[in-house]
Amino acid sequence: MKFICTQCGKAADSATMACHCECGGLFSLPQDHLPLWDKSLIDQKVWSLFRYHAFMNLDADEWKFVSMGEGMTPIVPFNEDVLFKMDFMMPTLSFKDRGAAALVSHMKAIGVKKCVQDSSGNAGVAVAAYCARCGIECEIYVPEGTSPNKISMIEGFGAKAVVVPGSRDHCADVCRSKVEEGAYYANHVYNPYFYEGTKSYIYETFEQLGRLPENIFIELGNGTLFIGAVLAVEHLLRSKAIDKAPNLIAVQSENCAPFMETVEQNADHIVSVDVKPTLAEGIAIGKPARGAEVLEMIRKHSIRVVTAPEAQILECRRQMAAKGFYVEHTTAAALAAYYRYQELYGPTHDALISLCGAGLKSEH
Ligand SMILES: Cc1ncc(COP(=O)(O)O)c(C=O)c1O
Ligand SMILES: [Zn+2]
């Protein structure tokens, strides 16, 4: 399998231990060679997201050992307009298992023995779990303020959790200095295998409903769910399985919204923003590493960005719990953003929101 550099276009063997191209650009995996969507290619014997393996870039069959049944999450109505996709029903209780299962399958295939990763929590938990399953040693860097429950899970899987004072962006910088020293970077943003897993969010929805909802709200920090979803929608369009793209809406935190600012200013590059504290820790990314790629997707598909009002997050979390959905704050932020979207653009029917993380992971 070949990686393609998103900056200079040069190809590299995907078995590389390097986390980016020599030019500094991040890698991507080609999509156009994959077969067009065809229901008969769904592997009906596989009860995990790997039932879509025909449409994913994967090395050999490692996933058969690595998979813990992630994906296949139910879609449940919240009210007559909103559907929830229950992505907290995963081995480590967040959607990050979609990407981690694919990434760690790749790592096992190329013989990685030891890795480092930085995360606001959930991706670190997911990578730590799958590494534990495969006997890969791992060290997870998390910013101070990360929920203690997430740190306990990381440690529970036998990984080392390193708490870094300062912002989420600083935490990533500290981790990357370890990568410069030679550690394999099992990072959900850098490594394109992660997106092969998150593509399944859309494939599953399409298979379960037999259609895609009109409005799909996607939490956007670095964009791991966002990029996977866009790649899958583009694939379904290319396959003529759908004749038009759903209205994708990217959700950012009001207190950390680089994509919102960039779109509003119509800037060429991701503008730098002040990152204020937010309850939505999962999407508090001020310097998204794939910012240019995500921005290009936003522009190409005319994707709207909406922010979650900070003051509404706890109320939304209560509302969701009152109907039986116990989610973490970042997830409640998506519902807050849905209400905000309605204020801006009017009644919004047939909407899908990812319940991206479970409530027991956050404190209050
Ligand atoms: C619960 C939850 N939702 C959404 C996100 C956003 O994912 P990304 O930063 O890849 O866009 C995260 C990231 O950690 C998360 O933990
Ligand atoms: Zn390059």
Image (cartoon, rainbow, N blue to C red):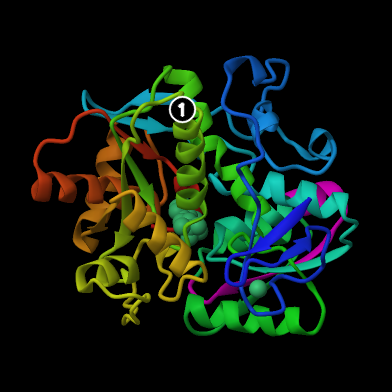
Q: Which image quarter: residue 37?
A: top right
Does the Cβ of the disc 1 residue fall within 8 Å of ligand 1?
no
In the picture, the quarter occupied by the C terminus is bottom left
Q: Position of residue 68 (x, y in %)?
A: 72, 35
Residue at the image position 51 percent from the left and 36 percent from the top: 235
Q: Position of residue 299 (x, y in %)?
A: 32, 57
Residue at the image position 66 percent from the left and 40 percent from the top: 33
Q: Position of residue 228 (x, y in %)?
A: 52, 46
Q: Is residue 220 visible?
A: no
Q: Nearer the viewer, residue 331 or 47?
A: 47
Residue 139 is a magenta residue: yes
Q: Position of residue 284 (x, y in %)?
A: 40, 68
Number of residues whose C-alpha sits closer than 10 Å to that of mark 1, classed few (under 14), some (14–19) or many (20 or more): some
Q: Is residue 80 visible?
A: yes
Query: Position of 91 compared to 182: left or right?
Result: left
Q: Is residue 31 above or below residue 172?
A: above
Q: Is residue 294 above or below residue 230?
A: below
Query: Position of 320 compared to 205: left or right?
Result: left
Q: Nearer the viewer, residue 227 or 172?
A: 227
Q: Is residue 304 above or below residue 115?
A: above
**Extent of the magenta region:** 130-145
Residue at the image position 28 percent from the left and 75 percent from the top: 267
Residue that carries the numbered disc 1 in the rendered image? 205
Residue at the image position 30 percent from the left and 51 percent from the top: 303
Residue 48 is a magenta residue: no
Query: Position of 216 compared to 26: left or right?
Result: left
Q: Is residue 81 above or below residue 341?
A: above
Q: Nearer the viewer, residue 252 or 215?
A: 215
